[in-house]
Image (cartoon, rainbow, N blue to C red):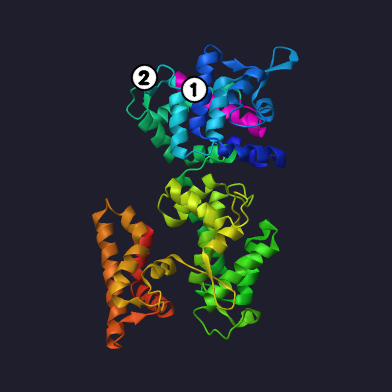
Amino acid sequence: MGQLLEKANQKQISQTLEDQLFSLKKITLKELYECIEIIDQQYPTSYRLFYEEFDQIFGILMDDTEPIFNKLSEQVSNNKELKMADVYECLACFALFSGDTFENKIQFVYRLFDFDSSNTIEKQELIFTISSVIKSLCKVVGVPVPKIEFLESLADACFLMIDKDHSRHIDFEEFADWINRNFEFQDFLLKFSGTQSYPNAKKRMKEIISEYDQDFMRQSKGQVVIKGDQLKELLYNQLSEFEDEELIGYLFSVIVETSKRFQDMNVYQDDIKDLNIHKRDYLDVMRAWCAFSASDFNNKNRLSVQDLRILLWIYEDEEPNTFKVIAEMNNIDEDQSKTIDRKEWIRYLCSEDRTGGHVFKSNLKRNFEKFEKPTNGLVDVSNIKEILTEVFREKIVKSKKNRTALDNINKLIDKLCIDITKDLRQKELTELGWGDFRNYIDQAIDKNKKLCQYLDQNI
């Protein structure tokens, strides 16, 4: 699998082909089942299709079927003009390139190759499954198709890994569990067809964030603050591959404006060498950037509505329903292009301050806004625990089956509340604004640093 990924990384796909493959995301599995009905009714014994047959079946999916047919088809005998495409390779290809969810794609492929409808897959069926999937994707992206001996050997190895109970049959749970745990196979599907899973996207996001975090600490020489001019140099070095100075400049301005919000408002962007940028503000903004990077696997700076589902999921740690994805797409897609780019995504997560600058709204800020009063922008002290519970919701959800971890989270929330409210009561304050709230949270977290570090490392 690694050899195939290496070949795919070396392969340059033309813009025309890339646009064609991107358009396949509009396909749904429901439409693909309609294609299967046509095959069952009109070509029940056909395993290979001429172009006219291919067009009749899959013409409902796209306006021009010829480019994809030319990719999937093979020459028949010695006749260069006569080409045919394998039915199962076609179906597997369209399923994987479709805009449906990762889970639904897995189920479709599993059912497609369960030839005897036994709800299990035997070794020969798995060989056929893996062969069809790999061959179709290699053909489409223009990578040499592996020899059948390699595919059979790969399928044999996979069967041994998947068949945990040694029943010589693989049920769907075993099949799905193996794919969900096998990031190398997921990377193959991602690279070749854009098929994304939440766990793999979340894993990539964390890896990218970790790199930016380490870069910041190296540039700041281990400090949690950095001068504005140093950060600008760091950011342009980190993002040099994008070759878009306007975009990098905008990202830098968001980090600066966000950081200025907690400092002397007389410090302007022109004086960035005098501005201390806190790591938390940098990472708040870069977390959103990294979520986009993890979703935009080929760095083309455009995400479809199907990609947005993964982006929202890994950023908010809650699977969005279809209604939310469509609603958010309409909110984010400023130019109505039916795709979103990085700048649109970052702008969506910002609010405009009174000077026209864009200030990033972190997870903490968004939860603060849920409870602030529209009349004065303040929150009641009594709401602090609810806000903190929302902030730690991801960890709470992940710890539901781990009583010790859940107790530690609740313990931390209680400690933070006590530390914050104790000082407020002494000052006889019943409300506080965002700036004061953020400072209190930082102080409380710093005081409980060991517990916070423990939770980060173990959840």
Residue 168 versus residue 101: which sits nearer the camera?
101
**Residue 74 screen position, x and y as percent:** 67, 20
254 or 169: nearer the eye?
Answer: 254
Prevailing secondary structure class for the magenta stretch in the rendered image: helix
> SS at mark 2?
loop
Left-right relation of 87 to 158: right
Locate residue 186, reporting x and y percent. Answer: 50, 39
Disc 1 secondary structure class = helix
Furthest toward the front, the residue is 375
Above-or-below relation of 241 to 153? below
Task: Quickly name the residue at label 1.
Answer: 127
Q: Amino acid at mark 1?
A: Ile
- What residue is at 56 percent from the left and 20 percent from the top? 87
> In the rendered image, which residue does mark 2 sit on?
118
Q: Is residue 211 visible?
A: no
Question: How far across and down, in percent of the image, does residue 182 sit?
Answer: 45, 39
Residue 349 vs 225, above or below: the answer is above
Point out the stretch of residues depicted in magenta.
124-146
